[in-house]
Amino acid sequence: MPFLRTHACRSRSNARRTILFSAGLVVLLAGFVSVGQAQGPSSTGTWWLNLRTTGYVYQSFDPAGDTIDRFEGYQHVSGSMSGLASGKLTFRMSARFADDLRYDAESLEFSRLHRAQLVYRPNSRFRIEAGRQFIQEGVASLTLDGARVEYRHDRRWQATFWNGTRAPFGHGFDLADSDDATARGARFAWTPSGSMRLGLSTAYRKRGGVVAVRPVGLECSASATSGLRFMGRADYDLELESWRRLEGQVLWRQAECLPEVRLQVLNRRPTIDAASWFSRFNNTDRIQLTRLVVRHEVRDGWGGEAEYLGTFVDTRSANRTGLAVLMPFGRVGWSVHRGDVGDDSGLYGDLGGRLNSWLRAEGSASILSYTLLQDDPLEEERVVTTLAGRLRADLKPGMQVTAEIQRIETPVHTHDVRFLLGVNLAASGGASRFGLMSGEVRP
């Protein structure tokens, strides 16, 4: 929930940047519209654009106890243009601009560039991507400022290579120094049959000019006609000379009338790379995790779910058990957590449904009681409750308005209330049209 996060202040310079960005976005939207009109419905090119504007209103207190009125604004924009260069070139982007419009103070930077990517497909075998992009390839998972090349020989063989720098952790608009944040890697995939897939991957990453990780990994996935699927993965770090992660997952779903069963077993070391000062403590205990989920849902949306999650570190352990009832209009559940890190139990629910063809009402609530240590006395128990209610109105195709009120009560804050108002605009033109470009107006 947004009100569970603590936001730093934004300076007025960011407010001016947001205003300038909004003005530029209007120009960009006009350009998209003109391109869509020029292409016409029969063109093979397509563009789409989404703008989501959200405002949070609440009060906070400074260290002296004085009240501060907060009005946080967020501008999310994403879009793409395809069919360029005779259908071989595609551009995609996604960004967020954030600011506190009423509070003038030193701030952290909360504007982010998630993606700005050019995709070039010269033929059916090659795919070349350049710019800021998310890489999820075997042992690598990062946002890359650089290039990625994919070669698919046939349906059985595939090779991927990428090289560049790791994007700043805050996903800011600045680029990282290539000498301090080098990132590169490769992955080879082989599909010997339709039911089995094998993968071999490696990566290399520097942080602060020091080699952080050099993992190599092997992965395997397979499926059987009985509804059984298996996935296994092993990662070894050549820099620290230790196994980073050993993981196995099993999914069983034999028929729609039977429950779905998921089992995950994980053994990993703490996420500490070789560039960290803490890497000298190489005898850190490994983390073991077991998760079992049994879920069954009938066709009309009713069903149930049971989950067990166990975490084990040396002699310390923690176990969580949860039950949930699934309904066509929401979900209600209960969970209890016991272990060396403290105890907690609580109820939660998310319900919602359409009031008419264009208006939807939703609500969520939770109550959680917890103790900081295992077997704490009853007088040490603390309670946290959250409530939220929202209305979502589809005013016309491609235009949605959301209004929400949120409330949280903790042992520290008894009246934490926030208001949210958001507008979501979406449009597409060219070969396909939807949203604001569809020309339909709701009566």
Image (cartoon, rainbow, N blue to C red):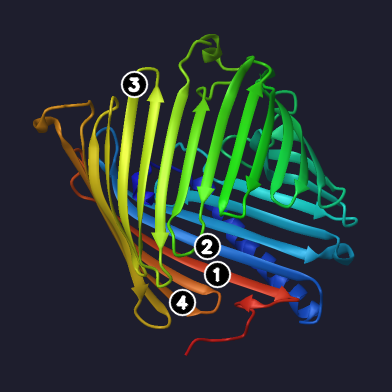
Residue 296 vertical position relative to residue 29 in the rendered view, above or below: above
Q: Mark 2: which amino acid? A: Arg
> Which numbered disc flags the more N-terminal residue, 2 or 1?
2
Label 2 and label 1: CA atoms lie apart by: 6 Å
Identify the mark nearer the N-term, 3 or 4. Answer: 3
According to the image, label 2 marks what residue?
52
- Which residue is located at x 60 percent, y 21 percent? 243
**Residue at image coords 55%, 14%:** 279
Element type where label 2 sits in the image: strand
Disc 1 crowd, CA 10 A, few/some/many (<14, 14-19, 20+): some
Classify residue 136 by image quadrant: top right
Is residue 361 visible to us here?
A: no
Mark closer to the chain start, 1 or 3: 3
Residue behind mark 1: 425
Which residue was labeled with disc 3?
316
Question: Which percent across, then down, holds residue 207?
Answer: 65, 23
Residue drawn at x 23%, y 42% is: 345
Q: Secondary structure at mark 3?
A: strand
Farthest-out residue, left: 379
Q: Nearer the viewer, mark 1 or mark 3?
A: 3
Q: CA distance from mark 3 to mark 2?
A: 44 Å
Alpha carbon distance from label 2 to label 4: 14 Å
